[in-house]
Amino acid sequence: MSDIFLAGVGGQGIITASRIIGDAALLAGKNVLLSETHGMAQRGGSVVCTARIGDAHGALILDGRADVILGFELLETLRALPKASRSAAVISSNETIVPLSVSTQKLHYPTLEEAKEEILKAAGKLLFVDARKLAAESGVPMSSNVVMIGALAGSGCTGLPKAEFARAVELNITRKVSENITAFNRGFDEARSLSL
Amino acid sequence: MERILTARAGERILLLGNEAIVRGALEAGVAVASTYPGTPASEIGDTFARVAKDAGIYFEYSTNEMVATEIAIGAAASGVRAITSMKHVGLNVAADALLTFAYTGTRGGFVLVTADDPSCHSSQNEQDNRYYALLGGIPLLEPSSPQECYEMTKKAFEISEQLELPVIVRTTTRVSHVRGPVVVEEIVPGPKKKEFVKDPKRFVTVPAVARERHLVLLERLKQAEDRAERSEFNRTIKVEGGGKLGIITSSVAADYALDAASELKLSVDVLKLGFSHPLPRKMVSNFLKEHTVVAVVEELEPVVETQVRAICQHSSINTKIVGKDDGALPRAYEFDQSIVAAGLAWAFDLKAPEMPLPEKAEDLPVRPPVLCAGCPHSATYFAVNKATNRKAIFASDIGCYTLGVSPPYSAADLLVCMGSSVGTAGGLAKVNDLPIIAFIGDSTFYHAGIPGLINAVHQGHKFLLMILDNRTTAMTGHQPHPGSCKMPGGEKLTEVPIENVVKGCGVKWMKIVDPYDVELTTETVKDALAQPGVSVIIARRECALVAERNAIDAILAKQYIDQEACKKCRTCVDKFQCPAISSIDKVQSIDDELCAGCGVCAQVCPHNAIKEAKK
């Protein structure tokens, strides 16, 4: 069993990312359940998805049970921390999308250092990925989500082979496929080089 | 072509619950499909919209759920298979048609999918639509997974034809929006045309016919119960060898019960009901007799629980029943594994399961959904607040624009359902001195706003109706509506312009404005409020997301804040709202990437500090 909790902001391609995980699991002959947030939350609100690889019945992940937090935005990674198990790996983009509440209620958006401290208090391992930069360098600036999938694959946390992940990217991304595979590989190498 | 259409028999594909419903219907040879979009049901219609042409079937986005249901009734009464889908509250709109169709019964398989929304993730209530099955005498199937969505939808057509009754397939958000593997069979196209055979003594429900048909319905329900007794969807699952403890459960709660039973290391028998109305009373009765304690695990209302208790009374069974009645399980909000585990621990007198304590999240800045950058509704709300100085009562409606309830606009004071802005505005106007302004979206206006407007004209109510016309059904994923001229795939539709409808309703004063023109909109609102009766403003501007996607006027002109001219008055963040504008450490700025180039903020700034960026 591997329980992955995905968190980010509406419009970041999180549902697509979860579908890639789902197809990768299926291609590897595993069972998988994904739950998705649709509708209201997508208007720039917080979005979460779950991916449970293995023979679970319910698709939801309880607090303290996620093996991996895959965060697409720094603040949303922090918001997802209650889901992390003590030994969880947190793989998070360092991208920041400042919510309107910071402006209107004069709130503080956490710094990378503060975030790091909070994450390590809650979970076992941490990897920040400069997903936006790696996506842009691959020629697909909108594909941070694919970079993050690469990092998840590279981390080895799911137990799924790289080839299945790459094939799943091709199944779900129809435009600029080779650039997206590059983005996937950049994410993969990033996680590998840090030997999470 | 879509994988959902090309997948061959035996293939295992990843499908959303809603997509699996479509595949099931296609394999059953459905001829006609209809919907009015609404979360969490929208992807059923959207998937039909994508595949209908290639699959050779008819699909439409109907004006509302009642019309959608009637379209399917017309087809199924003629003898072909038909399906209609809607969110739970949509069935309130469609109920008038459905409940009497149960009397006439159907010839071709008729399936109505209702997607309920426990926890109100994107709804105004969390009503339990299983009651409609009981209310109408309609067989009910409750899938819990994508595989079951597929299997039950397919089977529902057969059940419907055999019993000659409509069948309800009821999902919830966690069934419709869960994606999982589905093993499919072959798509076998069914007949697309059938001539309606006249039979007014069955299909024309004048009182004499209705009285007869009610008896027929009651007889058919007995047959339906027999069918439920034999249904493969009602089965007992033994966990850890089973034992004297039992669980009766349905829908996604069954999955949580199975996870929770493993977690608690329970030896328990789980009776999972997929064909849950009519309740297979013999099966349930036997299950009760074989167990000493039975927990009934179902989300929302105690629909099965109440019937189970009645069976105990009827058959003098002493089995202890535990459920919502004793507070073991809650009647509000969706379940998860931990809620069910706690309920089972209570029911079976076990130590409550140990759940790891979550690391308490710090107080993080919230991120609720907001109106998008460039959203025309934002501009409209700013103008209305300016025109009224916020001294007005706002009757709101269902759509993206409901988000205007939050500051800085606070532009919603009363909202109950689709179309309610128009009707409630009339009532508000009768008893309030403040001006009344009703806001309704274009799709919602066609859906349920028109009778309210006719009423307002006819009765002489005095209020301003603002139709926020962004040319699409935005909230649910940009589906077309009667103001659209084509389907997503390009097929032509006949546009029914809103202004023609408004004029046809007898409205004497109507103006059309571009909300991006803040001053014109503000002045028009002032004029409208000075009118003696009902006045209508159509605030027309394409949804910013669609405009961006289609590159229609997408980037008028990106803006920036001239920091030297900025007087730090915060008007752009305190009175206006745009995700592209932030104020951090007392510096207001515009994110160039997020800016949609609508130029509204430049009109909002009282110091002319927001300027067009050089291209």
Image (cartoon, coloured by chain):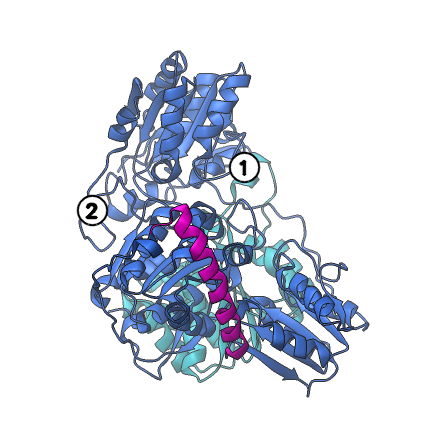
Question: Label 2 sits on what residue type?
Answer: Leu
Chain B as rendered: colour: blue
Of residues B49 and B90, the one drawn nearer to the viewer in this rendering: B90
Characterize the local packing of mark 1: few (<14), some (14-19) or many (20 or more) Cα atoms within 10 angstroms: many
Residue under circle 1? A103
As displayed, is residue A193 above or below residue B90? below
Which residues, given as a range, are shown in magenta?
B204-231
- Point out residue B503 in the picture as x, y percentages from the top left corner: 27, 24
Q: Amino acid at mark 1?
A: Ser
Query: Which of B572 and B430 lies nearest the eye of the viewer?
Result: B430
In percent of the image, x 64 and y 70: which residue is there? A65
Q: In what element is the residue under mark 1?
A: helix
> Mark 2, chain letter?
B
Mark 2 or 1: the one toward you: 2
Disc 2: which residue: B493
Callout 2 and callout 1 share a chain: no
- The x, y position of residue B195, in whole percent, is 20, 61
Please identify the quarter of the rendering in which residue B311 is found. bottom right
Pick out the residue farthest to the left: B492
Which shade is chain A?
cyan
